[in-house]
Image: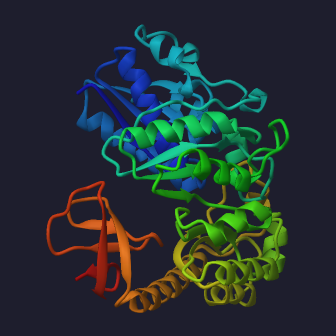
């Protein structure tokens, strides 16, 4: 075993894991497992600790290094685990010199914690990689951090304030990935619709997307990850309407469908804003497919409030639903609010998932007979332009884009003819 990375959480973590693994390998580290954690919920942190203990049992000779958002906000929790050799902050993990300095370990506990003040970080540099090992699509970080303070979220304290990668650097990274065979690139970050506010001229996300597609004409497919619809700019809407290389799939950070819950979350949109945005995008791009994050059982949520979150699945034409049962995150305002009973939270999450499953079934049925271009992810599985899974009855070549007629579905995936 050389360097192994175990990744939790978002697409940005996936991208950063690739960069870290390369830094660690170039530093000559061996027998190392890097655990890149997530802190989006208390449950995510618990799963990371559980995974660390399991890794220590399975790989008794390996050195376990813990990083990511949970390590940034709770370094002492992981430093206290006997299985952990070192704890590294989110800023430090992306520096080649951090990994080069790890050859000598076994120092005192306090020296094993390399976590500094993330709020002091003012810039985000791109980390050049020529591809994503084992993946058919590549992720490119264009932004990090968040300036907003939603009451349920600890992530700004794990990632710092919003900062953007200069447009020229993003273009060069995408060009490099395409030259090395990437057919599809996903732009990722913590709050990517805040892109550019800290850059000269304050370019917006739509400006970046248009520039990428213009300057890298060889790029076949471009996706953008989770967006905050209230920050969608005119250029982004224009490119959604007029550029076929931008894939017709948007994942929305909705979180709830009730105005009072949204206000208590300190979200910046209301229910009507979300519905109006989805209707506008559907007019511009009728084949657009929406995914969304929705939290079930937020503090003070009544049954009537929850019903509005159920209803917004249909009102926003949502297809791919990510349901999060609310779990209080220590250090957030929501953790101090009156909590909904755990059995009620779980039951509401179940009902939301059922609503999402019904919406997916409707979408799958509507796809039958359609002609789609599918990016193959494994020898029999790929995704359409709208990010829906397609299964083939014969081996295919990962990384290829193949035309397919949709013959049916099995309730979860489309079936190619």
Quarter where residue 55 is shown: top left
Residue sitting at x 68%, y 70%: 255
Determine whether 40 is above or below 243 in the image.
above
The reply, left or right, for residue 220 in relation to residue 110 is: left
Q: Nearer the viewer, residue 83 or 411?
A: 411
Q: Nearer the viewer, residue 283 or 164?
A: 283
Count the marks: how many? 0
Q: Position of residue 329 (x, y in %)?
A: 66, 54
Q: Position of residue 56 (x, y in %)?
A: 31, 34
Question: What quarter of the picture does the N terminus occupy?
Answer: top left
The reply, left or right, for residue 162 in relation to residue 286 is: right
Q: Is residue 301 visible in this depiction of the protein? A: no
Question: What quarter of the picture does the C terminus occupy?
Answer: bottom left
Determine whether 69 is above or below 150 in the image.
above
Q: Is residue 297 visible in this depiction of the protein? A: yes
Residue sitting at x 77%, y 44%: 196
Colour approach in the figure: rainbow
Residue sitting at x 79%, y 46%: 203
Quarter where residue 113 is shown: top right
Q: Position of residue 224 (x, y in %)?
A: 58, 58
């Amino acid at each position: 075993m050389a360097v192994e990375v175990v990744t939790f959480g978002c697409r940005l973590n996936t991208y950063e894991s690739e960069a870290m693994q390369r830094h660690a390998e170039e530093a000559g580290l061996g027998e190392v497992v890097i655990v890149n954690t997530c802190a989006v919920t208390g449950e995510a942190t618990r799963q990371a600790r559980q995974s660390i203990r399991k890794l220590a049992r399975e790989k008794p000779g390996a050195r376990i290094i813990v990083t990511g958002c949970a390590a940034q906000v709770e370094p002492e929790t992981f430093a206290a685990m006997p299985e952990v050799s070192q704890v590294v902050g989110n800023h430090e993990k992306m520096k080649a010199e951090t990994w080069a300095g790890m050859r000598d370990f076994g120092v005192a506990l306090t020296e094993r914690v390399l976590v500094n003040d993330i709020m002091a970080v003012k810039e985000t540099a791109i980390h050049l990689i020529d591809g994503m090992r084992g993946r058919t699509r590549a992720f490119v970080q264009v932004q990090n951090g968040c300036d907003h303070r939603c009451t349920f979220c600890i992530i700004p304290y794990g990632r710092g304030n919003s900062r953007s990668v200069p447009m020229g650097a993003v273009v060069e990274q995408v060009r490099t990935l395409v030259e090395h065979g990437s057919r599809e690139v996903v732009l990722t970050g913590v709050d990517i619709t805040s892109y550019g506010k800290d850059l000269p001229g304050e370019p917006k996300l739509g400006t970046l997307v248009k520039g990428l597609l213009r300057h890298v004409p060889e790029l076949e497919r471009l996706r953008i990850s989770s967006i905050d619809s209230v920050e969608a700019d005119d250029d982004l809407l224009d490119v959604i309407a007029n550029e076929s290389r931008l894939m017709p799939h948007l994942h929305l950070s909705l979180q709830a469908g009730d105005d009072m819950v949204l206000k208590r979350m300190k979200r910046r949109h209301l229910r009507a804003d979300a519905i109006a945005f989805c209707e506008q995008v559907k007019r511009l791009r009728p084949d657009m497919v929406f995914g969304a994050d929705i939290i079930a059982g937020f503090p003070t949520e009544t049954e009537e409030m929850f019903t509005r979150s159920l209803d917004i699945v249909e009102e926003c034409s949502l297809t791919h639903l990510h349901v999060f049962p609310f779990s209080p995150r220590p250090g957030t305002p929501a953790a101090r609010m009156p909590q909904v009973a755990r059995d009620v939270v779980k039951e509401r999450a179940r009902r939301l998932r059922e609503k999402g499953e019904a919406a997916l079934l409707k979408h799958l049925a509507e796809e039958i007979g359609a002609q789609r271009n599918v990016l193959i992810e494994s020898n029999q599985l790929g995704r359409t332009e709208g990010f829906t899974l397609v299964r083939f009855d014969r081996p295919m070549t990962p990384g290829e884009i193949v035309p397919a007629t949709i013959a049916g579905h099995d309730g979860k995936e489309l079936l190619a003819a």
